[in-house]
Amino acid sequence: MGQEIKLLDIKNLVKVFTIGSGFVKSRITAVDNVSFDLESGRSEIFTLAGESGSGKTTLARIILGFIEPTSGKILYKGKNITEIKGRKEEMWFMREVQPIFQNPFETFNPLKKVDSYLYETVVNYGIANKREDINSAIDEALNLVGISFQEIQGRYPHEFSGGQLQRISIARALITKPSLLIADEPVSMVDASLKMSICNLFKDLKEKQKVNVIYITHDLATSYYVSDRIAIMFRGTIVEIGPVEKILIDPKHPYTKILRDSVPEPDPEKRWKEKIKLSSFEEREFLSIGCKFADRCPYVMDICKKEAPNDIILDGVTVKCHLYSS
């Protein structure tokens, strides 16, 4: 019996950027040997959480094909997407994997009617050609996010709230009937009253439409509420990955503990602030030979500054920390 093909299989992904100029250059490993997968035959919300500079957005852009990885593989339904060639294969992947960006006001041109974006999506992906069929496809996608076609027809972006625009942006992504949405900080630009409605929408899409979501955020409260699994990233590395309840209720990695302690209890009104006295060491931490968190870890040992830790599996959670490698 053959091995089941995964929906998404990230294997040892690395992205190195060269910063600086002339003789003063540094090589920053923004994504450092990252691996995770999403299974076929089920749907889930998988969260990449981390502060600014953790590498989560770079990772998302690599998966979407916007940035080429330095090494590693990204397999989507068994296809190596870094080797996709030709318009037909590109369109197939773009239909299957759709992005949702942070700021809905930047997604839409203020001088262009919102419905024109939805029309273009239907036509460009060859979903329909006749006006009646185009309208039907748009209306179907909008209904999934709780908006009707009549509500948006002929209107410009400034006539909508941020929450409405984000829902329209999600509807646009749903027109192609994707299997995977990659949502980069999708609730960071909407007010608190709308955060949970967007999160509930993702949960509905997972449960009713069987859409998988990679949810990228620095907000641990919404992570706890919406996620099935979570990966905590620090300086390009996944330091802990597993079921969200296990990681946020009983974190193993010292860094995860600091983040969790900044939100004393899972409460949508309490938010993990993006900066937690964590900025002055950023470049040095990226360049560290051992554990990138060693300079700030309360449990640091000599080995932490000399060797990068291996992955250790504890009670269904994978943690990258020397504390557990005895």
Image (cartoon, rainbow, N blue to C red):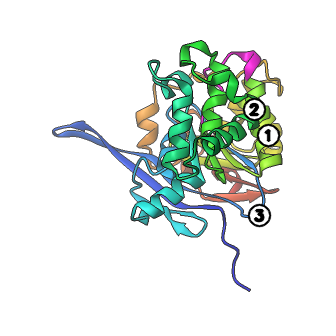
Residue 102 visible within the image: no
Mark 1 vs mark 3, CA separation in Å? 17 Å
Earlier sequence position, callout 3 versus callout 2: 3
Image position of 160 with respect to 3: above or below: above
Residue 41: numbered disc: 3
Whole-percent x and y of residue 148? 73, 28
Residue 189, magenta (yes or no): yes
Label pair 2/1, CB-CB below 8 angstroms: yes
Compared to residue 4, the image places residue 72 above or below, namely: above
Q: Secondary structure at mark 2?
A: helix
Q: Which circle's residue, 1 or 3, is located before the other in the chain?
A: 3
Q: Quadrant of the C terminus?
A: bottom right
Q: Position of residue 230 (x, y in %)?
A: 71, 45
Using the image, tell me which numbered label, if any, was put on residue 224.
Answer: none
Residue at (68%, 15%) from the top-left corner? 191
Residue nearer the viewer, 296 or 260: 260
Look at mark 2 in the image and give the residue it sits on: 199
Q: Quadrant of residue 39?
A: bottom right
Lateral position of residue 85 relative to residue 227, left or right: left
Say whether marks 3 and 2 touch (CB < 8 Å): no
Name the residue nearer the viewer: 240 or 108.
108
Residue 259 visible to an observer of this rendering: yes
Q: Residue furthest left?
A: 22
Q: Which residue is mark 1?
A: 203
Question: Residue type at mark 3?
Answer: Gly
Report the quarter where the N terminus lies: bottom right
